[in-house]
Image: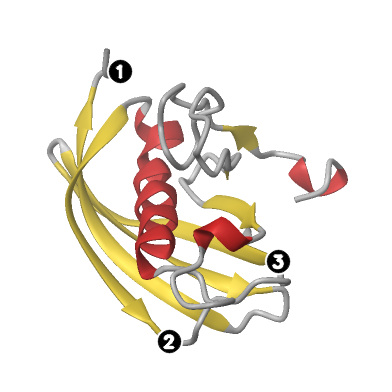
Amino acid sequence: MSEDSRQGWVQIPTYRTCFVCGEQNPIGLKLKFFSLPDGTVETEYIPKPEHCGYSGIVHGGIISAILDEGIGWTGFVPFGKYYLTMELRVRFRKPVRLGRKYKFRGELVKKVGNVYVARGALMDEEGTVYAEGEGKYFLTDEPE
């Protein structure tokens, strides 16, 4: 996401040791997530060779982690709380490959008490969906 296209977006804070967003995790993805006030979340991902299972194809666990993180962050700006994953369903549509840039986009679906449901997808720059997911998350204070 370019500086010009971030107007109205808020960068979500990272959690230092997180595999997906943590800047202090030496083997982590170090993705930066941005949110609109309605909970829409975006990030960009460029796969590295060490993210692959089969040669040139990103491991499904890496893709699931990106979906879980992005979908989970949809509650941070609107509710002002961190989250714990309760449930995650992922559907893989196409292999995610090296040498391409992908975008994650997630959105809130509903909130009931301290639980919210959200969904998101990992797509290429043309909008073709490679993986999508839906999750259920529990709101919590900042983990220690």
- The residue singled out by tag 3 in the image is 101
Q: CA distance from mark 2 to mark 1?
A: 34 Å
Q: Residue at x 52, y 69 (%)?
A: 122
Of the image marks 2 and 1, the number of the one nearer the N terminus: 2
Element class at badge 1:
loop
Q: Secondary structure at mark 2?
A: loop
Nearest the viewer among 15 and 42 is 15
- Is residue 114 left or right of 2 when viewed as pictured? left
State the residue position of label 1: 142
Quadrant including the C terminus = top left
Looking at the picture, does residue 138 appear above or below residue 22? below
Image coords of residue 12 (percent x, y): 54, 31
Q: Residue at x 44, y 25 (%)?
A: 15
Above or below, 94 relative to 27 = below
Residue 93: numbered disc: 2
Question: Residue at image x 50%, y 67%?
Answer: 52
Task: Check disc 1 and give the amino acid type.
Answer: Glu
22, 70: nearer the viewer = 22
